[in-house]
Image: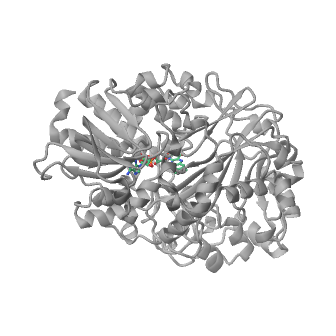
């Protein structure tokens, strides 16, 4: 990219607290960081420690992953030296401060009583795991974004336990419509668009999406019926491709004649949607490209790695004439099975499910976040210095990567577990009667090498799905208004989707109503490598995320916005106020897939069932335990893990 284009994009302009070090760190390679840089994350007890307001590279931020990678590479112990015993003893130590870890603390405290001593350790500079808050301050406004988990939603209904936790936190899910301004974008004549890029489709062109699918909440396209005309006139597709697109969406052809519904589903479960479109429906290649990234937000892979049966379940076109009965077929992903009760259970906070994490923290450590309702929670500032106080029964210690978890004595008779963690390049130990590993399963074999090999193999198979969630604060959204766009699906873009913030106002927090006001927009990339098996695609994507430097991320973000919004007069150098890229190389829990996971299609014990077995005084939580990338899964497995410990140690009696 030449200098003049960089100037046009505003690469040299001042944006909110540009995080220079993030760029440098990634350019030189994280493993080459001097040890002192491990403490870049700061001291959580200092008065100016407030990670939600950091911009630049967040998610797996610099300082959060180096210890774990050193442990993986076998270099940690040489660097850290002999661990220092803190002398601290707890009833429970939780490894991982995501929803599952925080919920484990919550359930344990409920059972063991308010004086139970609990320590939660997390490697990030903020709690919440994937449920992270991005907070921006532009002029005199505070603007919130979700750095990861978007909302309370799940393809299957929340369990009784998960619902009870949500209710106990004060969240009244059915009250959501009163906070959500459903008609805002519609009243401004904004609708969903497709952005065709010149590299993939021969021209940069934004066109109304006549048939939005696979995702997108609350913004029904008002123009859907009339959009056809505009789409057919303007989309940079050949006449043949347009004809095929129409046929795909409207024809009632039985493309698999002579088979029963069950046989058809069995066939569809074994072929990708891309193969179905190409080989069975026989549409133009451009239409396959058009649909390629539609499942990215759900699965982190494209239609080459999603079964045709799942595509049918998700409402993709091309199945109407097959006359499939509506029951789920064998091997369907839970996301692809419609459930009306689950569909209705939806709540989006302006910072996503970071509000759930914050409510859990307030339950356990009231001094850390003032207030007593969900409305005051949205604008409440967390006091991080209160998270790890000696006098508090529950403590949360950030920037602390656990590197070893071992029983003190033999697994069968040990009374304690010793937990070793790295913080600022040094190793420390604490002891506890119980331990919940609510961290990523791939990490556990490194922490507990004494686990049975079969369990370690199962844990290792849970490698996560990489994602990039980027929040960009714009000084105004007049260019969106001019184009009549509320969101873009960009099948060939660096980001496959970008959209205006969901308009939710709660308590003193008010979303942007006027296009002249600043707003946060959300962009999604799921790096993957079409053609490879799903797990290999995720592995390549993870590598990409860890090796892409800040400058490239910033340039790609600015460039895509500039190109998509050019007809609306968008100027990236003028209109962008802040950028936060939430990098999640270890993102969604891997969900089983009928194309790659035989046990899922044909039955048998799933790896997550083997992986989550308790081991002495150690129980295993995290959403990986259910191979299901949803908040309720993280909660359900916290509940199970704590119950395993409580049952085993008769702690319930103390509740
Ligand atoms: C980008 C994104 C968007 C999502 N959107 C939604 C959504 O809209 N709705 C929904 O229901 N679900 C969503 N999910 C899934 C949902 O966020 C997760 O299922 C859930 O939050 C996982 O919680 P968890 O505690 O199991 O794991 P995590 O949130 O990953 O928390 C685990 C924590 O343990 C830490 N850890 C790992 N190893 C160690 C170690 N050795 N020492 C210390 N700490 C360690 C991790 O860094 C992490 O902070 C989303 C996930 C992602 C990634």
The residue lying at 31 percent from left, 60 percent from top is: 445
Q: Position of residue 486 (x, y in %)?
A: 76, 45
Q: Quadrant of residue 245?
A: bottom right
Q: Nearer the viewer, residue 139 or 39?
A: 39
Q: Quadrant of the N terminus?
A: bottom right
Q: Nearer the viewer, residue 155 or 170?
A: 170
Q: Is residue 567 left or right of residue 440?
A: right
Q: Is residue 296 left or right of residue 115?
A: right
Q: Position of residue 388 (x, y in %)?
A: 39, 31
Question: Does the image show residue 158?
Answer: no
Residue furthest top in the image? 371
The residue lying at 57 percent from left, 53 percent from top is: 583
Q: Position of residue 640 (x, y in %)?
A: 29, 44
The residue lying at 39 percent from left, 33 percent from top is: 165
Q: Is residue 496 left or right of residue 25?
A: right
Question: Does the image show residue 93?
Answer: yes
Q: Position of residue 37 (x, y in %)?
A: 52, 50
């Amino acid at each position: 990219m030449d200098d003049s284009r960089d100037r046009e994009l505003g690469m040299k302009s001042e944006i909110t607290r540009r995080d220079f070090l993030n760029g440098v760190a990634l350019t030189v390679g994280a493993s080459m960081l001097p040890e002192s840089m491990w403490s870049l994350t700061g001291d959580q007890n200092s008065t100016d420690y407030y990670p939600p307001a950091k911009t630049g590279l967040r998610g797996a931020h610099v300082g959060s992953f180096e210890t774990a990678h050193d442990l993986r590479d076998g270099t940690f112990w040489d660097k850290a030296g002999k661990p220092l015993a803190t002398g601290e003893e707890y009833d429970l130590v939780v490894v991982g401060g995501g929803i599952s870890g925080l919920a484990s603390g919550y359930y344990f405290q409920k059972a063991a009583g308010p004086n139970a001593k609990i320590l939660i350790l997390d490697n990030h500079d903020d709690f919440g795991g994937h449920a992270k808050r991005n907070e921006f301050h532009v002029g005199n406004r505070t603007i919130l974004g979700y750095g990861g988990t978007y909302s309370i939603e799940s393809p299957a209904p929340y369990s009784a336990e998960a619902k009870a936790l949500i209710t106990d936190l004060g969240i009244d899910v059915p009250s959501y419509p009163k906070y959500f301004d459903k008609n805002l974008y519609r009243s401004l004549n904004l609708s969903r668009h497709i952005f065709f890029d010149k590299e993939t489709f021969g021209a940069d062109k934004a066109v109304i999406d006549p048939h939005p699918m696979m995702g997108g909440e609350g913004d029904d396209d008002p123009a859907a019926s009339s959009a056809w005309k505009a789409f057919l006139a303007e989309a940079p597709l050949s006449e043949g491709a347009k004809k095929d697109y129409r046929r795909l969406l409207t024809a009632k052809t039985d493309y698999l004649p002579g088979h029963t519904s069950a046989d058809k589903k069995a066939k569809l479960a074994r072929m990708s949607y891309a193969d179905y479109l190409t080989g069975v429906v026989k549409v133009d290649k451009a239409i396959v490209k058009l649909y390629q990234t539609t499942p990215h937000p759900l699965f982190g892979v494209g239609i080459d790695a999603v079964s045709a049966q799942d595509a049918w379940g998700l409402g993709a076109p091309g199945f109407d004439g097959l006359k499939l009965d509506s029951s789920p077929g064998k091997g369907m992903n839970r996301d692809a099975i419609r459930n009306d009760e689950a569909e209705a259970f939806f709540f989006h906070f302006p910072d996503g499910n970071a509000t759930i994490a914050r409510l859990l923290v307030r339950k356990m450590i009231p001094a850390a976040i003032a207030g007593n309702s969900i409305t005051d929670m949205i604008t409440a500032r967390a006091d991080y210095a209160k998270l790890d106080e000696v006098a508090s029964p529950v403590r949360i210690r950030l920037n602390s990567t656990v590197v070893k978890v071992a029983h003190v004595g033999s697994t069968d008779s040990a009374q304690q577990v010793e937990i070793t963690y790295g913080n600022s390049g040094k190793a420390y130990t604490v002891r506890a009667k119980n331990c919940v590993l609510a961290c990523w399963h791939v990490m556990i074999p490194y922490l507990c090498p004494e686990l049975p090999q079969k369990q370690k193999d199962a844990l290792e198979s849970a490698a996560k799905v990489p994602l990039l969630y980027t929040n960009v604060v714009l000084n105004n959204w007049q260019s969106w208004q001019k184009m009549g766009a509320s969101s873009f699906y960009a099948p060939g873009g660096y980001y496959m989707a970008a959209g205006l913030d969901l308009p939710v106002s709660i308590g003193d927090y008010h979303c942007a109503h006027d296009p002249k006001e600043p707003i946060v927009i959300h962009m999604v990339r799921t790096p993957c490598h079409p053609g490879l098996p799903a797990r290999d695609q995720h592995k390549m994507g993870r590598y990409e995320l860890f090796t892409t430097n800040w400058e490239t991320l910033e340039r790609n973000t600015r460039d895509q916005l500039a190109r998509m919004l050019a007809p609306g007069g968008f100027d990236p150098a003028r209109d962008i106020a802040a950028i936060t890229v939430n990098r999640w190389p270890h993102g969604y829990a891997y969900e089983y897939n009928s194309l790659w996971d035989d046990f899922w299609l044909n039955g048998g014990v799933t790896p997550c069932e083997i992986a989550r077995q308790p081991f002495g005084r150690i129980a295993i939580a995290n959403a990986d335990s259910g191979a299901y990338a949803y908040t309720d899964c993280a909660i359900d497995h916290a509940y199970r893990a704590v119950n395993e410990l409580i049952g085993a140690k008769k702690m319930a009696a103390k509740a």
